């Protein structure tokens, strides 16, 4: 019986180790590779099966800029692409269907200070502005106090003649 427990424990460890190795290969399949030293001029980015929020977060860490509004990007499919150009051009292409703003900086090596995702309307047209219709003014009947005041002023003017 004791020997059977040791065998079961060994089998469990083997299954656990194989599971860890398989998970590692899945994690390695999701990669972002950046080639090039001049993000203001030209770099090549290879993205394999990564969601947009992860791409932006990694770009922010690699190139030293701030990301705002990542909660607006959590939806969507994974991305697989290879792009070349300046970092600003690549970000513009990645975010073309998102309502976003790229803040430039002359002091940062990448030339970008901040990327802001403004809302979560991926791939849709912006909402139309609401137009205000002119309100109708209703004639109000004068209150009793105003009516009495008008009547008393009429009486005063009529008696003074």
Image (cartoon, rainbow, N blue to C red):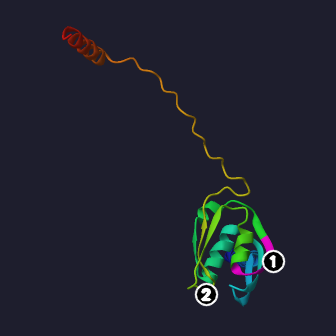
User: Residue 24 in the image: x percent, y percent?
Assistant: 73, 78
Q: Earlier in the sequence, mark 1 or mark 2?
A: 1
Task: Judge the density around disc 2: few (<14), some (14-19), many (≥20) Cα neighbours within 10 Å.
Answer: some
Q: For the point 70% across and 58% down, which residue is it?
A: 122
In the foreground, 63 or 107 = 107
In the picture of the structure, the residue carrying the numbered disc 2 is 109
Q: Which residues are magenta?
A: 80-87
Q: Is residue 4 above or below residue 158?
A: below
In the foreground, 134 or 2 = 134
In the picture of the structure, the residue carrying the numbered disc 1 is 82
Q: For the point 72% across and 53% down, which residue is it?
A: 124
Q: Is residue 24 above or below residue 151?
A: below
Quadrant for the N terminus in the image? bottom right
Q: For the point 74% across and 85% down, which residue is it?
A: 43
Task: Judge the density around disc 1: few (<14), some (14-19), many (≥20) Cα neighbours within 10 Å.
Answer: some
> Within the magenta stretch, is there residue 51?
no
Numbered mark located on residue 92 in the image? none
């Amino acid at each position: 019986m004791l020997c059977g427990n040791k065998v079961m424990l060994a089998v469990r460890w083997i299954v656990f180790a194989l599971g860890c190795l398989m998970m590692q290969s899945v994690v390695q399949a999701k990669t972002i590779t950046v080639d090039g030293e001049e993000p203001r001029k030209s770099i090549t980015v290879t993205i394999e099966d990564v969601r947009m929020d992860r791409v932006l977060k990694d770009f922010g860490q690699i190139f030293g800029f701030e990301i705002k509004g990542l909660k607006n990007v959590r939806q969507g499919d994974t991305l697989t692409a290879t792009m070349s150009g300046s970092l600003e051009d690549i970000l513009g292409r990645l975010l073309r269907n998102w309502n976003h703003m790229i803040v430039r900086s002359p002091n940062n090596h990448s030339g970008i200070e901040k990327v802001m995702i403004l809302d979560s309307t991926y791939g849709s047209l912006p909402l139309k502005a609401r137009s205000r219709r002119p309100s109708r003014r209703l004639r109000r009947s004068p209150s009793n106090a105003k009516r009495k005041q008008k009547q008393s002023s009429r009486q005063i003017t009529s008696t003074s003649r």
